[in-house]
Amino acid sequence: MTVQEIYSEVVDKLKETAKIIGSSFPHVGKDGKWDNMEERDITWWTNGYWPGILWQMYDITGEEFIRTIAEECEEKLDKALDIFEGIHHDVGFMWGDSAVANYTITGNVRSKIRAEHAAATLAGRFNLKWGAMASWPGKEICKSIIDNMMNLRLLFWAARETGDMRFKHFAIAHADKMLTTLIRPDGTAHHLCEFNSETGEFVQHLGGQGYSPDSQWSRGQAWAIYGYTRMYENTGDEKYLNAAKKCADNFIEKCGGKTPAWDFCAPIEEGEGFIPDTSAGACAVSGIITMSKYVENGEKYIDAAKSIIVDMYENYKSGGEMILTGGTGNKPANSNVNVGLIYGDFYFLEALRKLCDENYRNIYA
Ligand code: GLY
């Protein structure tokens, strides 16, 4: 199949899925059906992805029923802001992909305020002694995780909207600290590290959702590619582009044009066979496609992205409500292995639109 054929199928399917699941909060897809996080946990980190997909679909199709559902989701997410204590560093995914998209497309001021509120909570995670954000704070030990790179774009958006440059300064300090603590010199990414909450001293790397502290969790690698690409777009600082490129080169080499494994260093355990993570592939290719605009030999990166997209779709196309199966949420915990993941579908649609739609524009933070 060509990416254009895949894009057409994906857009058609998402229109149908929107009619079936409406303003719900899918996270994991099994047996052809999405779950719904609305009652289970409205603060759940993935709850911005479905409204984010809907806004992308509204931007593509202009269909009013899609906009209505996206707005309903965003209103329901207000409960998460009210609960507040459940809020985490992933507010960029939650409101950067929902409320910012709404504000970009419609100019809705209530959406702008929601996203500014979310950005203020993210900035509040900054630990002065460590010089970066605590993705997961703690009384004695905090953790900074590579995923947090994806949420920094909300801070740049907030700096532009409010004129308060502290948002930008927090984002830059965090990205710099992660360059020296989570990105290895060979362009591979750790998932996470711990630091001392009181002194800000580095403690150790941990395996997190990857195979081991020294391994290479493929979704973490994808977060790094996309996150540092957006850092370059927001600052123009070449060191971020170089980091994104090094991480992308490594990712492309490890994939060999095919769907990534859940961790590039994990042994293929007896009886389990190859365990893919299509969400890592989708996020990485979306980042790589954007990055390709800024580097020499951009075409090489586009070709690699297309090859991974086609391989994922041909091997992991869902027959049910999802676009892709073959996503792996948390292999060490044996949780959500080889399933549909809403963030996989989100980045898959985004990557396809970047390649196939001449009207593509970034609607998110
Ligand atoms: N941000 C959590 C994950 O990637 O699973």
Image (tube, rainbow, N blue to C red):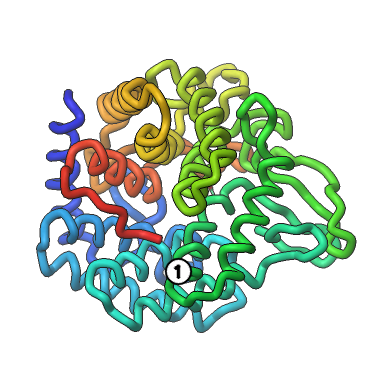
Occupied quadrant, residue 295: top left
Q: Residue 127 location in percent, x, y? A: 75, 65
Could you tell me if residue 103 is visible in this image?
A: yes
Q: Is 357 or 2 nearer to us in this picture?
A: 357
Could you tell me if residue 219 is visible in this image?
A: no
Whether 280 is drawn above or below 133: the answer is above
Image side of residue 222 versus residue 306, left or right: right
Occupied quadrant, residue 166: bottom right
Q: Is 35 or 153 nearer to us in this picture?
A: 153
Q: Quadrant of the C terminus?
A: bottom left
Whether 198 is drawn above or below 362: the answer is below
Q: Residue 2 location in percent, x, y? A: 17, 25
**Residue drawn at the location 59% of the way across and 66% of the way down:** 88
Whether 167 is drawn above or below 201: the answer is below
Occupied quadrant, residue 136: bottom right
Q: Residue 139 location in percent, x, y? A: 82, 67
> Can you name the residue that lies furthest to the right here?
199
Secondary structure, mark 1, is helix
Image side of residue 145 versus residue 61, left or right: right
**Residue drawn at the location 79% of the way across and 58% of the way down:** 130
Residues packed near mark 1 inside 10 Å, few (<14), some (14 to 19) or many (20 plus): few
Image side of residue 364 versus residue 138, left or right: left
Whether 345 is drawn above or below 159: the answer is above
**Residue drawn at the location 26% of the way across and 37% of the way down:** 318
Q: Residue 39 location in percent, x, y? A: 43, 71
Residue that label 1 marks = 160
Kind of residue sitting beneath label 1: Arg
